[in-house]
Image: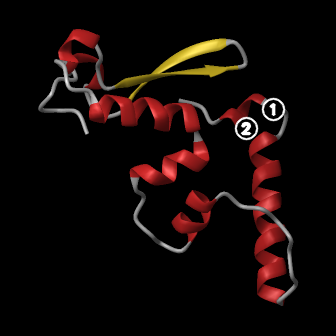
Amino acid sequence: AKPAAEYFDHGLELLEMIGRLVGKALYEGVMVDVGFAPFFVGKILGHYSHLGDLLTLDKSMYDNLIKLKRYEGDVADMCLDFTIDDDVFGEVRSHELRPGGADIPVDNSTRL
């Protein structure tokens, strides 16, 4: 799986440069008014991620996972597996959320 930055000319280099600029500013004690997402700041500080952190990253995915978690019927009827489809500039790619995820059905015992 490619990060979206790889689809831009020198995208990874630009991200690295931004990281260096922010790092240098922090090192020099320069106040940088950048709005980082709470889940990102938590990762930088070494905090463990929780399902609630997903709300600030992808509200739709968060809402759907909460519905799945609270679903009272048989989750196997939804025909889900441990993959996620990602649309990168019109090209849909499937990513396994765990090794062999495409072959592991989600059921009431394997959901959240």
Q: Where residue 70 sits: x, y (%)?
A: 28, 34
For the view shown, which residue lies furthest in the left direction? 109
Q: Residues within 10 Å of mark 2 (few under 14, many from 20)?
A: few
For residue 46, above or below residue 88? below
Figure quadrant of residue 42: bottom right
Residue pictured at 62% horizontal, 19% vertical: 87
Which element type, helix, strand or loop, lies under badge 2?
A: helix
Q: What element carries label 1?
A: loop
Percent coordinates x, y for residue 38 in the rendering: 61, 61
Q: Position of residue 30 (x, y in %)?
A: 87, 84
Number of on-image labels? 2
Name the side, left or right, on which 100 lies relative to 93: left
Q: Which residue is drawn at 58% across and 13% down?
A: 92
- The image position of residue 95, as x and y in percent, is 44, 25
In this view, the residue in front, 108 or 95, is: 108
Relative to 42, is 102 on the left or the right?
left
In this rendering, the answer to whether 28 lies above or below 64 is below
Q: Distance between the residues labelled 2 and 1?
A: 6 Å
Numbered label attached to residue 8: 1
Packing grade of label 1 (10 A; few <14, some 14-19, many >=20) is few
Which residue is rendered at x = 47% and y = 34% of the image? 63
Q: Which amino acid does label 2 sit on?
A: Ala
Q: Please state which of residues 94 and 34 is positioned toward the viewer in this rendering.
A: 34
Q: Residue 74 carries which label?
A: none
Where 64 falls versus 56 (above or below)?
Answer: above
Labelled pair 2, 1 in contact (Cβ < 8 Å): yes
Q: Which amino acid does label 1 sit on?
A: Phe
Residue that carries the numbered disc 2 in the rendered image = 5
Q: Quadrant of the C terminus?
A: top left
